[in-house]
Image: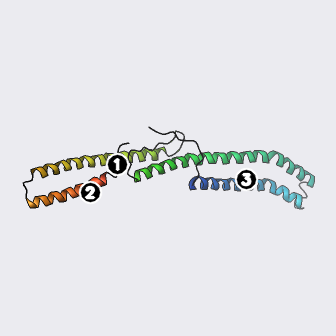
């Protein structure tokens, strides 16, 4: 049974760093655009560099017109880009968070988990690769468990069939000790939910 994922903001290094970097790029773009658009007008108002082209009244009128026409859509675009960045970041950070959780569970020996990702998120191919890895590990561990049971049965048969010789008893005890060690290592893995 898969558990439903809650919609929530993900706090962590990846989304915060990515969003902050994009925010800085957007701010730089915002400042460069504003400087390129308004810089010549401000210079024209403050100095006499452009006396032949525009009068100070024309420059002031253009400056005020640009202020009214350009800044509101530019601020709106900036907000839209920031919101889009947060959404994009969470479509990457959410799956990374879930994949990290699945990998920690695998590291604890539980192979009964599956990596699931929401439909509109990214990293589906990576989740599929992790699921293939889990299935491959699960099958190999189950094969080792089967071989362990077979060898354990053979040891019991050998013990019953033993004729009481001292050398064979020691060998059987060493084999049993090795089987116990292998069994304890196999118990570390959980292959079924």
Q: Nearer the viewer, mark 3 or mark 2?
A: 2
Where does the image place residue 178, in percent across and percent down from the top left? 23, 58
Query: Which residue, given by chain and number where applicable, does mark 2 sit on?
Result: 181
Q: Secondary structure at mark 1?
A: helix
Where does the image place residue 1, in percent across and percent down from the top left? 44, 37
Tell me which residue sits at (70%, 54%) in the image: 27
Tell me which residue sits at (67%, 48%) in the image: 82
Tell me which residue sits at (23%, 47%) in the image: 149
Q: Earlier in the sequence, mark 1 or mark 2?
A: 1
Tell me which residue sits at (9%, 61%) in the image: 166
Q: Residues within 10 Å of mark 2 (few under 14, many from 20)?
A: few
* Quadrant of the snapshot with the C terminus: top left
Left or right: 138, with 24 as reference point = left
Query: Which residue, given by chain and number where applicable, does mark 1 sit on?
Result: 137
Where does the image place residue 8, in percent across and percent down from the top left? 59, 44
Q: Earlier in the sequence, mark 3 or mark 2?
A: 3
Q: Is residue 55 visible?
A: no
Query: Which residue, given by chain and number where applicable, does mark 3 sit on?
Result: 30
Q: Secondary structure at mark 3?
A: helix
């Amino acid at each position: 049974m898969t558990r439903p994922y809650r919609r929530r903001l993900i706090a962590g290094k990846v989304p915060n760093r990515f969003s902050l970097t994009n925010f800085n790029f957007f701010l730089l773009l915002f400042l460069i655009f504003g400087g390129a658009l308004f810089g010549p007008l401000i210079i024209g108002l403050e100095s006499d560099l452009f006396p032949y082209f525009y009068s100070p009244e024309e420059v002031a009128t253009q400056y005020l017109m640009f202020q009214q026409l350009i800044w509101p859509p530019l601020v709106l675009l900036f907000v839209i880009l920031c919101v889009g960045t947060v959404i994009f970041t969470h479509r990457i950070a959410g799956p990374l968070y879930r994949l990290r959780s699945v990998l920690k569970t695998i590291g604890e020996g539980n192979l009964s988990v599956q990596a699931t990702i929401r439909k509109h998120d990214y990293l589906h191919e990576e989740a599929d690769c992790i699921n293939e890895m889990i299935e491959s590990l699960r099958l190999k561990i189950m094969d080792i468990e089967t071989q362990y049971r077979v060898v354990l049965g053979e040891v019991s048969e050998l013990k019953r069939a033993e004729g009481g010789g001292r050398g064979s008893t020691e060998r059987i005890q060493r084999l049993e000790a090795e089987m116990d060690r292998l069994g304890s290592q196999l118990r570390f893995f959980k292959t079924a939910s």
